[in-house]
Image (cartoon, grey):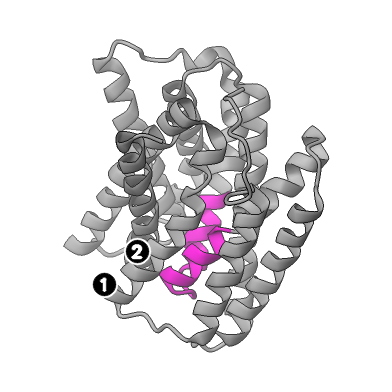
Amino acid sequence: MGGRDLGALLLLSALWGASFIFIRVAVADLGPFVLVELRVGLAAAGLAFSAALLRRLPKLRVRWRQFALLGLVNVAIPFSLISAAEINLTASLAAILNSTTVMFTAIVAAVWMGDALTVRKVFGVVLGIIGVTVLVGWDPIAVDWAVILSVGAMLVASLGYALGSVYAKRTFVGSSPLAIATGQLTAASLLMMPLAAVSVPDERPSTIVVLSVLGLALPSTALAYMLYFRLISNVGPTSTSTVTLLVPLFGLVFGVLLLDEPVGLGTLAGLILILSSVTLITGLGFGAKEKSRA
């Protein structure tokens, strides 16, 4: 991986780590549905504007059914669940739980695409489950039913990401990264519109909430998706998957520094176990060969 791609990987990790901070700040005032609608709507508009400038505006109507399904599974549902979960969870805890996406992706790919679940991957999945248990059981926040349901929502969101990524790999072979990103975000915006319309908050959002929404929509969603698909194209999926090791670290650091969130032994132990699980499943550090993009 060259210097530019490494820089893009680090920037992507920071942007996705920061997204959990933006959500944590804004969701209490806006609610999950309005926040997600603003996030995906502004991001889709930003990508469409970029595509127009590049004269590469995608023809979304040709594959609107596929974009609608991808937008639902890969964006609308997980974004809504994560936003709702962060009403009760710290941003750092949510970021760590989100890294279980790799664990679910290994399982979905094995069932749907026939990818082999090796002994190493199975051990990684088991280790990931143990990590989630440790993270929730030993975390400094008080555990009640709201927290347990929020953790469940985060795990379902991770499963959604896994289903979405495998579906995209099977369905959008040969499509440009810009078209996929714009299509799924546009579809998600249309899907979220009715829910957002009936849950508009009564009070005007504060300046910090507005800035958090802009940060979430433009850098942490629109720009992040462009970086992500660029990395997939340049260095392949295996190297790009290392972002899952870095996002929780950025989320944890940002949460502590910016929101003064508590960190206990359970947080650190769960982080280590889950990231070890990700390492085992992806094969990083085990001489895994880089796969070419399908």
Using the image, tell me which numbered label, if any, was put on residue 36.
Answer: none
Q: Earlier in the sequence, mark 2 or mark 1?
A: 2
With 40 as the anchor, is 107 left or right in this view? right
> Up-down: is 268 above or below 118?
below
**Which image quadrant is residue 247 in?**
bottom left
Give left or right: position of 120 versus 173.
right
Quadrant location, the C terminus = top right
196 vs 278, nearest the viewer: 278
Label of residue 21 in the image: 2
| x, y percent for residue 89 | 48, 74
Contact flag, marks 2 and 1 (Cβ < 8 Å): yes
Give the spatial CA distance, label 2 vs label 1: 8 Å
Residue 267 % position (x, y)? 51, 79
User: Disc number at residue 258?
Assistant: 1
Left or right: where 223 falls relative to 88:
left
Dot 2 lies on which element? helix
Dominant secondary structure (helix, strand or loop) of the stretch shown in magenta: helix
User: In the figure, residue 162 lies in which quadrant?
Assistant: top right
Residue ranking furthest to the front: 287
Q: Residue at x 61, y 53 (%)?
A: 101
Relative to 215, is 148 above or below?
below
* Residue lying at 59% horizontally and 33% vertically, measured from the top left: 70
The answer to if 226 sits in the magenta stretch is no
Residue 143 x %, y %: 58, 86
69 or 158, nearer to the observer:
158
Q: Is residue 263 above or below residue 176?
A: below
- The residue closer to the viewer here, 269 or 74, is 269
Q: Which residues are magenta?
A: 78-99
Amino acid type at circle 2 is Ile
The residue carrying pointer 1 sits among few (fewer than 14), some (14 to 19) or many (20 or more) residues within 10 Å by Cα, namely: few
Q: Amino acid at mark 1?
A: Leu
